[in-house]
Image: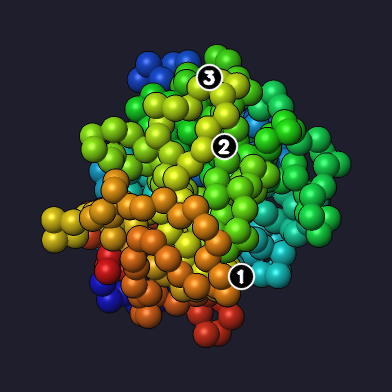
Amino acid sequence: MNRRPLSLFVLAFLVVPLCAGSVCSSELTKSLREGKPDLQSAGPLAFGPDGILFIADPRGAAIFAIATTDTGKPSEKGIAVSELDKKVAAALGTTPEDVLVNDLAINPRSGNAYLSISRGRGPEGAPVIARVDAGGKIHVLSLDKVKFSKAALPNAPGPEAVGRRNRSLRLESITDLAYIDGRLLVAGLSNEEFASTLRSIAFPFKKVDRGTSVEIYHGAHGRFETRSPVRTFVSYQIDKKPHVLAAYTCTPLVKFSLDELEPGKHIKGTTIAELGNRNRPLDMIVYEKAGKDYLLLANSARGVMKITTDNIGTAKAITERVARGEREGVPYETIESWKEIHQLDRLDDKRAVVVRRGEDGALHLETMPLP
């Protein structure tokens, strides 16, 4: 969709409350209580019913459910903001270098885009949630007085825990999440011996268990792994049964049966593809085109992959080393026109919204037709 980039001078920045002037009416929002969430960081995002936004707080090892009251009718327009980082920085009174966009989620009720942002880099970065509507306006959302609930992880890595190359394990306590049929599925690390964990948390939040530890065979490394977290995942039906399709660093694609996720259990996933080493998966969606389902996987070093799901249920498990960065398993094609995509989410059946770094070095929010 052709749209003229919005000028910095005509883009309005508003600070608005998430839930104001009305009582949230659904049974789910009635379970929330008014207050100020003690959000320490803003990481992965996901939407549930009735405009409820789930915000992962890896630093605080918790997940917040926020009533946005953003339940209007979606616009047919796409969403576009040129120089997104510069305009967010202007709204926050800082510089683009101090703006880090961590995730993107589209509200299916309204079609508006939500961004989780760090204002400042490193451990002192402040969490920010922003909404972008179809007109391109950026609304920095106030969390001072909202309806929310909180789910704290009982066995997250400690605040000072570090892994290889001195990386913070606490910041990987939550690496991705998705709402599926009344439950929030959460990937990340625990403080258990087998640290890689998938959690299935009932919503409204009542109790969070210790999760299910997961093990995979990493073909590029030639070994089984239990301490590498899922980086991004989607839910997908295989033979009419719910599964998770998960991507890991360096880059195995693995399937898990949701029926096997039980508290305290240890399960093994089935590695169905090795997509190339020296690469980190960034974001993934599933969509249908011409009667077939595809995965669209954005990566740090290997572009955007369009992965067929035709034989994903019967794909042969990879159980031996895949040497020298070779690729094996479920086939894919690289979408050459989708370059420097950092985050993406479906806008509708035909379009996706992406955060893309342009040749000018700036981040841009764009609407693109699904390939």
Q: Amino acid at mark 1?
A: Arg
Residue at image mark 2: 214
What residue appears at the point 37 percent right and 74 percent down from the top-left corner? 334
* Left or right placement of residue 360 versus residue 58 in this view: left
- Percent of width and height locating residue 78: 30, 62
User: Dot 2 lies on which element?
Assistant: strand
User: Dot 3 lies on which element?
Assistant: loop
Front one among 287 and 125: 287
Return the mark for residue 205: 3
Residue at image mark 1: 278
Q: Amino acid at mark 3?
A: Phe
Whether residue 134 appears in this view of the structure is no
- Percent of width and height locating residue 106: 39, 49
* Left or right placement of residue 247 versus residue 349 in this view: right
Q: From mark 2 to mark 1, how far is it between C-alphas? A: 22 Å
Q: Quadrant of the C terminus?
A: bottom left
